[in-house]
Image: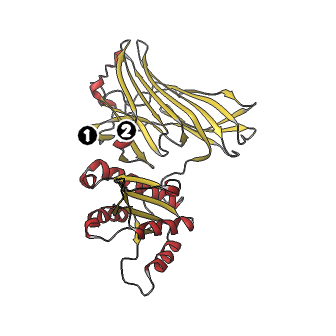
Amino acid sequence: MLMSKDIAVFFSCSFAPADAAVNELIEGVCKGLHLSCVNVGAGFSSVPPEKAREFISSAAGLIAVATVRDRLDNGEFIMPAAVREEISMAYGLGKRILIVGENGVRFDGFMNTYCTRLPFTRADLARPAFIEKLVDTIFTFRHEVAGSTTAVPNYATEYYSESTRNMVSLEYDGQDYLWTVATKKRLRFEAPLGREIISIVWPAVSSNDGAHHALPEWEVTIDAASRQFEMQSVVRSIQPDRLELALRFQPDPQPGDLIEFTRTFKSRRLNPLSSKDLPPGASPAIVINGRGYPVRDGVLIGERVRKLHAHYSFAAEYGLRPESVAAFVASHGYTLEYLAPWELARTSVDVESFGKKLLIDLRVDDPIPRYLYGIAWLPPA
């Protein structure tokens, strides 16, 4: 991860000895992600609430550790009073808030509506899955408070996709293989869009087959729309294994408009087909559960999406086996940053042989922007 500089955030927590391990873990992750934590744990001449307000006013946001404190009659707990007060201060000052809340703590009233919450148990502190999720949550929080200061690209805010469907197909015609990549998006606009939309097909791992291939065939069509639109397509880059288009709708879409469009790409060259097509000495494209996979492909979420469906189809002649394929979800900036197994856990993954083809389907509601949802595989010999 590329971080340009430290960002100051207010770290609200209990300093009780029992909470030391929790605070140490979360503050350590913050430090690793270049978030500089300030609090009122040290001695100051002003009373803590005054000093807390001063710090929160100058901080980019607030990270609160809400541990259990006083037990209620219904078995729930309330968080430390100072933490609750500092959250209220941050809310009143319009600061971004992240609460890492221990299970059992009561979050009633307005506190459910204006912050991000990550639940945890004491047993979670030693579990890699929770630590990965904690890193992801704080990383996303940092990006939100930093704006565009990180190397992570922003995602579209003028519109969202009601449905994004991506199909990657490898077919065999008796002599050669043909890749087809088709993406259909149903965009709903919430603000005027007066700019281009970038549409890309790009291999994560370049093929080294050495053969001469023709440029890909491609097409973009508007399938449905709330009113009459035309699409202008400008090729920014094109090679046998890749395509980058700049798409512009005319007239400019306005709030309430809907446009559904499909982009197709067909080429004899895209992902490496066999081990001999891999670059010499190449490292695995991704490592999943300790196993290195040379090839991967996925859908990078560039806008808010309600429903995502990624479909992969491999010809029987290719010989790819189900046990050679692994689905994954990963945070993605300019490259893969880290795997997100907690996000994969809520993604439906189906791998089956059907009609002599190998079919893989990934489905998930509300995928996370800047995350890559895809598969990795071991090319057949």
Secondary structure of the residue carrying numbered label 1:
loop
Q: Which residue is mark 1?
A: 289
Q: Position of residue 200 (x, y in %)?
A: 53, 37
Image position, residue 187 (x, y; %): 62, 36
Q: Residue at x 54, y 32 (%)?
A: 164
Residue 235 to residue 48: above or below:
above
Answer few, some or many: residues within 10 Å of disc 1's Cα (few below 14, many 20 plus, some between 14 and 19).
few
Q: Which of 359 and 341 lies nearest the eye of the viewer?
A: 341
- On the image, numbered disc 2 is attached to which residue? 344
- Going from N to C along the chain, the mark reached first, 1 or 2, is 1
Amino acid marked by disc 2: Leu
Which quadrant holds residue 27? Answer: bottom left
Q: Quadrant of the C terminus?
A: top left
Q: Nearer the viewer, residue 212 or 261?
A: 261
The amino acid type found where label 1 is placed reads: Asn
Quarter that holds the N terminus: bottom left
Q: Residue furthest front?
A: 73
Q: Residues within 10 Å of mark 2 (few under 14, many from 20)?
A: some
Q: Is any atom of residue 8 visible in this view?
A: no
Q: Position of residue 267 (x, y in %)?
A: 49, 25
Q: Secondary structure at mark 2?
A: helix
Which quadrant of the structure image shows residue 73? bottom left
Q: Is residue 216 left or right of residue 39?
A: right
Residue 123 point in image, percent of width and height: 25, 52
Q: Is residue 251 left or right of residue 364?
A: right
